Image (tube, grey):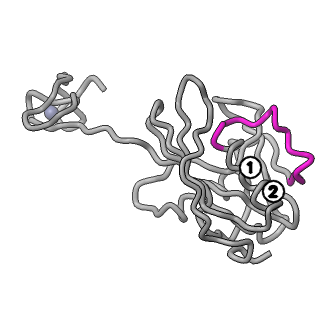
Amino acid sequence: MNFCSHCGSPLEFRIPEGDSLPRHVCPACGTIHYQNPKMVVGCIPEWEDKVLLCKRAIEPKYGLWTLPAGFMENGETTAEGALRETWEEAGARVELGPLYTLFNLPHIDQVYFMFRARLLDLDYQPGIESLEVRLFAEHEIPWDQIAFRTVKASLELYFRDRANGGFGFHIGDIRAPSGVLQPGLVVPIATAAAVKE
Ligand SMILES: [Zn+2]
């Protein structure tokens, strides 16, 4: 950030009085431009024993598979954002179930929220950000072509929980550069019955 979005003056990067972190501060109008983590919301659309994945038509990770998810917009809830992204990327109508995974990615200032969801019909079709949308059974998942670690971890947890007969709520941290998922908390509050099969 170089210029003030209020008055157009060049910004300074310094610790404001009474603060503890450097911020983009406008010396002309006094506005402090705070920057905070972005939230990514999405879901795991279920249909019988399969889940719906999207093949990305945009960078980053062009051509790799992902769950429908994207940045939250101002003025919407996490659930509304997940439904919107699922419609935009997969043309899919879903009924959201419980929140399933929360991943902190502090190295890129993002937090992922993935819900479980029930696909309502098979009338899905790729949106402009997707090359292809299709259902995958567990043994068909292209594990080496998954776009994001958050998505891979969510799918791994999903199939593990399903095999064990109950879905929990999982919180984890993914940090650079190791990329290793740090398991964090696993809160077993939901069961398979929470999303109607
Ligand atoms: Zn200003």
Cβ of disc 1 within 8 Å of ligand 1? no
Question: What type is the residue that disc 1 sits on?
Answer: Leu
Question: What type is the residue that disc 2 sits on?
Answer: Val
Where in the image, quadrant-wise, is ligand 1 located? top left
Q: How many marks?
A: 2
Residue 155's tag is: 1
Q: Indicate whether residue 71 is drawn in magenta.
A: no
Image coords of residue 13 (percent x, y): 20, 23
| Image quadrant in which you'd find residue 84 | bottom right
Residue 11's tag is: none
Q: How busy is the neighbourhood of tag 2: few (under 14 within 10 Å), some, or many (20 plus)?
A: many
Q: Quote the CA–CA distance across marks 1 and 2.
A: 9 Å
**Disc 2 designates what residue?**
51
Image coords of residue 146 (percent x, y): 75, 37
Q: Quadrant of the C terminus?
A: bottom right
Q: Secondary structure at mark 2?
A: strand
What span is colored magenta in the figure? 135-150
| Image quadrant in which you'd find residue 159 | bottom right
| Residue at the image position 87 percent from the left and 67 percent from the top | 48
| Residue at the image position 81 percent from the left and 32 percent from the top | 144
Q: Are marks 1 and 2 in contact (CB under 8 Å)?
A: yes
User: With respect to residue 175, does 103 lie above or below?
Assistant: below
| Residue at the image position 66 percent from the left and 36 percent from the top | 148
Question: Is tag 1's residue or tag 2's residue first in the polypeptide sequence?
Answer: 2
| Residue at the image position 80 percent from the left and 33 percent from the top | 145
Q: How busy is the neighbourhood of tag 1: few (under 14 within 10 Å), some, or many (20 plus)?
A: many
Image coords of residue 24 (percent x, y): 22, 29
User: With respect to residue 27, does 98 lie above or below?
Assistant: below
